[in-house]
Image: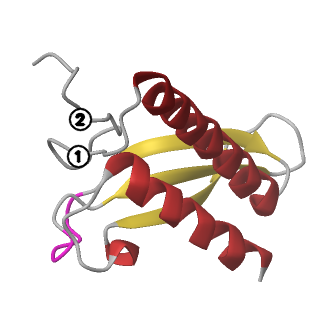
């Protein structure tokens, strides 16, 4: 249940940060968990936020963000969420400093950037 809660938060931030053309962002993004080779006897896990560029076809995917070397999957998912929150915080700070209150993604996926009158093309 912790994983599901963290995943929902990650997908929400990912939608705002990267954008999607899908009417259901849950099909555009996903969280992938994997074990990583480690010389120590304890397992090590990696977590990746991926996107399916064409949400109607799951034959191609791209890594948007990842974190590795976690002792548990939930610790890795928490770390990924923290990274995305930090990224969203940086975007919000930049938008606030520029007094831009609209974000428009030029391409998908695309890291959020505000579109405003003072922005030069």
In the image, residue 30 lies at what x, y percent? 45, 66
- Marks 1,2: beta carbons within 8 A: yes
Q: Which residue is mark 1?
A: 104
In the image, residue 15 lies at what x, y percent? 40, 59
Q: Residue at x 30, y 54 (%)?
A: 19
The furthest residue to the top = 120
Rendering colour mode: secondary structure
Q: Earlier in the sequence, mark 1 or mark 2?
A: 1
Residue 115: mark in rendering: 2
Crowd rating for badge 1 (residues with CA inside 10 Å; few <14, some 14–19, many 20+): some
CA distance separating discs 1 and 2: 6 Å
Q: Is residue 63 left or right of residue 46?
A: left
Q: Is disc 2 placed on a helix, strand or loop? A: loop
Q: Is disc 1 placed on a helix, strand or loop? A: loop
User: Was residue 100 drawn as part of the magenta stretch in this picture?
Assistant: no
Q: 98 above or below 64?
A: above
Give the magenta-colored segment's residue range: 55-60
Front-most of 15 and 37? 15
Q: Residue at x 51, y 56 (%)?
A: 13
Q: Is residue 101 left or right of residue 119?
A: right
Q: Is residue 116 left or right of residue 113?
A: left
Residue 119: mark in rendering: none
* Majority SS type along the magenta span: loop
Q: 17 above or below 52?
A: above
Quadrant holding the C terminus:
top left
Q: 38 above or below 7?
A: above
Which image quarter: residue 60?
bottom left
């Amino acid at each position: 249940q912790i994983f599901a809660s963290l995943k929902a938060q990650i997908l929400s931030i990912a939608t705002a940060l990267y954008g999607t053309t899908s009417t259901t962002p849950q099909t555009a993004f996903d969280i992938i968990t994997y074990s990583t080779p480690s010389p120590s006897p304890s397992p090590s896990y990696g977590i990746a936020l991926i996107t399916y560029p064409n949400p109607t076809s799951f034959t191609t995917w791209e890594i948007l963000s990842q974190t590795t070397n976690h002792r548990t999957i939930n610790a890795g998912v928490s770390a990924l969420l923290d990274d995305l929150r930090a990224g969203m915080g940086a975007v919000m700070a930049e938008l606030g400093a520029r007094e831009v209150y609209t974000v428009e993604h030029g391409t998908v996926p695309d890291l959020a950037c505000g579109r405003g009158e003072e922005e030069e093309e």
